Image (cartoon, rainbow, N blue to C red):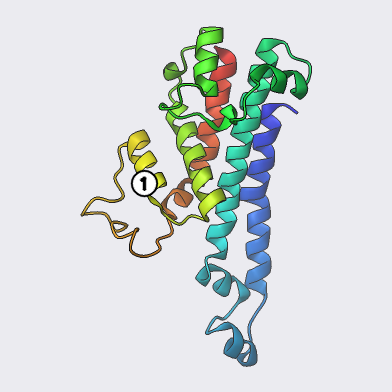
Amino acid sequence: MSYKNHFKRIRESEYFIRRKIEQTLKAIQFDEEIKEIAGNHDTYFDMWQATYGDKFYDMTTIVRLGTTIEMCLKDYYQSRKGFSSRKELKDHINSKQNIFQQVFPWHNQGILTKIESEFQVELFQIPQLKIMQETMLFRHLYAHNSGLLDKKFVDDYKRLSNIDLSSSSSEYRDYEIEDYFYFEPLKKVSHFIDGTEKFFDKLYAL
């Protein structure tokens, strides 16, 4: 499957299926009896939003986008090396670590380092590199911690983007004392989809 098709599927999920879900949920009206059980919500959509259902849906989109990044990096590297199968790729990599998820500047043995050294590709020239890296970082947060902040993510986010969620001025500064969901990236799902696809457009053009 072309990497373009992966992004097409993601857009279908985020822009078409999501809207259909919202339309369906808005059409389900709650009577007074149901409200006693489900809370003071007029529609299923209202309850869905109040219980973060829309946020968790968008989390799955980011997780899927992270999976797409991993798959596209595998496809790119496999193609450049001339391997005919994933088995050849796996045998060549010969590592217990999933280097195709290691896309951050501190990953000296990650896939981006291999691409740069083996194919003489200067990835820092791609403006969307950081968008792709942030997407993968958020993917880890949502896939492994359901969006709840922890020290590893906060530290890594500061290293990558120079954003300190633990600073005294941050609304998340007490994340180690109580649970905080980090929903902020979900406001920019389109930004991450478009930026990540453009990263691969530029990578394949180098």
User: Judging from the image, what secondary structure is the residue with disc 1 in?
Assistant: helix
Q: Position of residue 161 (x, y in %)?
A: 35, 36
**Badge 1: residue crowd in 10 Å (few <14, some 14–19, many ≥20):** some
Report which quarter residue 87 is drawn in. Answer: top right
What is the quadrant of residue 158 in the picture?
Answer: top left
Residue 136: percent from left, percent from top: 51, 38
Q: Residue at x 58, y 45 (%)?
A: 63
Mark 1: amino acid = Val
Above or below, 187 against 103 in this view is: below
Q: Is residue 15 above or below residue 197?
A: below
Q: Is residue 128 visible?
A: no
Residue ID at (57%, 27%): 99
Q: Nearer the viewer, residue 104 or 10?
A: 104
Q: Classify residue 11 as left or right of residue 120.
A: right
Q: Residue at x 65, y 21 (%)?
A: 94
Q: Can you identify the residue that label 1 sits on?
A: 154
Residue 134 visible in the snapshot: yes
